[in-house]
Image: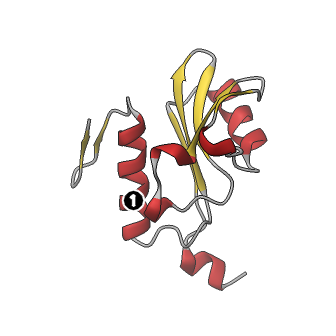
Amino acid sequence: MFKQGRMMLKFKTYQDLIEIAKITYQKGLVTASSGNISLRLDENTILITSHGSSFGFLKKEDLVKVNLDGRVISSKKGKKPSSELPLHLAIHKNLNPKIVFHTHPKFTNAFF
C-alpha cells in the first residue's frame, strides 16, 4: 500500500517499489539513472533495481531478485543488479530495513 501525501508506506509488491521510484523521480530527488532502491522480500531475499535503470521509467523487468549472499535468483532479460549491490546487502544484513534508497539529488550533485 502506498498513499501519496502523508506517505503511508507498506511496500509489499514490485508495483509498490515502482510507484515510489517514479514519485521520487517526479519530485526531482533523482536524475536519469542515478540512484537505486532495494526492498526486503523475506529473511533472505531482496529486490534491487538493475544496473542503469531509471526511477522515472522503472518497469518490473528492471528489478532483480537477489539473496543476501549476492546471488541472483531471478532476472528478466539478463538484467544485472545495481553496482551498489554490496552497499545494499550490507545495510540489509546489519540494519534489517524494509527498503533502502540510494539517491543522487540533482542539487547535491551540482556542487560536487
Quarter placement of the N terminus: top left
- Residue identifier under label 1: 22
Circle 1 SS class: helix
For the point 68% across and 39% down, the residue is 88
Q: Is residue 28 above or below residue 47?
A: below
For the point 38% across and 34% down, the residue is 11
Name the outermost residue toward the bottom. 110
What x and y, as percent, mark residue 92? Answer: 64, 30
**Colour scheme in use:** secondary structure
What x and y, as percent, mark residue 12? Answer: 37, 29
Q: Is residue 40 above or below residue 16?
A: above
What x and y, as percent, mark residue 34? Answer: 62, 65
For the point 59% across and 29% down, the residue is 46
Quarter placement of the C terminus: bottom right
Q: Is residue 40 above or below residue 25?
A: above
Direction from residue 90 to residue 61 in the image, left or right: left
Label 1 neighbour load within 10 Å: few <14, some 14-19, many 20+: some
Name the outermost residue toward the front. 77
Nearest the camera: 105 or 59?
59
Check disc 1 and give the amino acid type.
Answer: Lys
Q: How many marks?
A: 1
Direction from residue 4 to residue 107 in the image, left or right: right
